[in-house]
Amino acid sequence: MLRLEGPLARTDIVRRAGLSRATVSNLLTQLLDRELVREGVDGRRLGAGGRPPALVDLEPTAAAGVGIDIGRTHVRVVVADLGLNVLAEDVQRVDVPDHPEETLELVVAITRRLLQGSGVKRTELLGVGVGLPGPVDRASGRLGSATILPGWVGFAPRAELEKRLRSPVLVENDANLGALAEGLLGAGRGSRVLAYVKVAAGVGAGFLVDGRLFRGASGTAGEIGHTTLANSGPVCRCGNRGCLEQLAGATALLAQMAAAGVELDGVEALLRLATDGHAGARRVLADAGEHIGLAVANLVSLLDPDRVVVGGELGAADELLVGPLRYAARSAAVTTAGSSIDIVAAELGERAEVLGAVALVLREPVSLGAELLARR
Ligand SMILES: [Zn+2]
């Protein structure tokens, strides 16, 4: 409960847990003795009149986790404590798509180095969270065929990493992790039903409902990039026609620029050009925003989120993309009279996925905590 909702007063814990006061007190004494939680007066409530209640919170230094984000051209690793404070971080540019073995080798080397440098003991490590671009099968941890990493289809990175890092590993779709991070630490804070849309080489979405990830039955909820916008459009790598990703993914936008005679080596160059006022670059981003906006309108009509956060490499285009997106989504979505959807740019930038990966380990209600307790 403290991992998901803390800090909490003792009376709140008693009420929410439905346990007796004596049982809660007994359990908290054990946790305090093991220095897994701490209890103190909430400074923010001082001066509000009356005696502020003492709050029980996780002891940040009691445990740590590792977050790993594997993208198409980079790997990023962080070590963070239980309070989600980043202790060490590294990012390296690599050619990921066709080289799962080499990529994991590199990730393992970075992880070991960061763990050593941050002084986290093996007994304090709760686990390792890994973000991958594509649908991840919940049961097997294998990557589905709609991924943008063709060499990884059917590969099971969880088992490989558990063997090499000798730690529990959780694998999750990158857009889901973006949702988790923006919901906990970024532009989604305070939202109850949050939709996070990641616009990069692929387009994906993640949903956070009451602080928990909504993954669907098999873990593929939110594959918004492969919703159909034009059913007579070109054939997509997923086998369907006219998918959103073919109209608004980074690869599509760079191809549109090339067709206009402007060869660009990546999204950053496109964003720079647009910021400098290049009409073609601005138009390409605006059109992408409009297409994504239509898909977001469908999503809003189905899910009724109270906020939509737009992130990913292209989310950095900010209002150049989010403006047209917001307009298209608001024009097309069914909402109750007078309401309008709250659509905002993400705040965590390219660190969203890796922060989500470590939060997955530290804040999701998985069995990892019990193991740590037993070890301590
Ligand atoms: Zn598709």
Image (tube, rainbow, N blue to C red):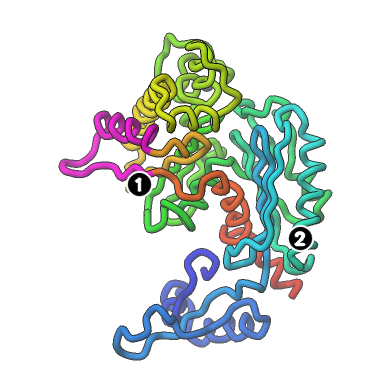
Q: What is the residue that sits farthest to the left in this orientation? A: 337
Q: Residue furthest bottom?
A: 51
Tell me the magenta residue range. Answer: 319-344
Callout 2 crowding tier (Cα within 10 Å): few <14, some 14–19, many ≥20: many
C-alpha separation, residue under disc 1 versus residue under disc 2 = 36 Å
What residue sits 48% from the left and 42% below the top?
Answer: 206
| Quadrant position of residue 94 | top right
Q: Which residue is mark 1?
A: 307
29 with respect to 335 (left or right):
right
Element type where label 1 sits in the image: strand
Q: Position of residue 281 (x, y in %)?
A: 44, 23
Under circle 2, the secondary element is: helix
Q: Quadrant of residue 280?
A: top left
Residue 367 rendering spot, x and y as whole percentages: 65, 61
Q: Is residue 228 above or below residue 163?
A: above
Position of residue 17 relative to residue 77, above or below, is below
Q: Nearer the viewer, residue 201 or 269?
A: 269
- Tell me which residue sits at (49%, 16%) in the image: 256
Q: How many marks?
A: 2
Please tell me whether residue 353 belongs to the stretch shown in magenta.
Answer: no
Q: Would residue 222 be seen by someone viewing this image from the given angle?
A: no
Work out whether mark 1 precedes mark 2 in sequence or the reverse, and give the earlier one: 2
Which of the labelled discs sits on residue 115, or is there none?
2
Q: Residue at x 35, y 45 (%)?
A: 305
* Residue 361 location (% of width, % of height): 63, 57
Residue type marked 1: Arg
Amino acid tagged 2: Leu
Decide if residue 327 is on the left or right side of residue 281: left
Front one among 318 and 300: 318
Residue 28, relative to residue 334: is it above or below? below
**Quarter-wise, where is residue 89 in the image?**
bottom right
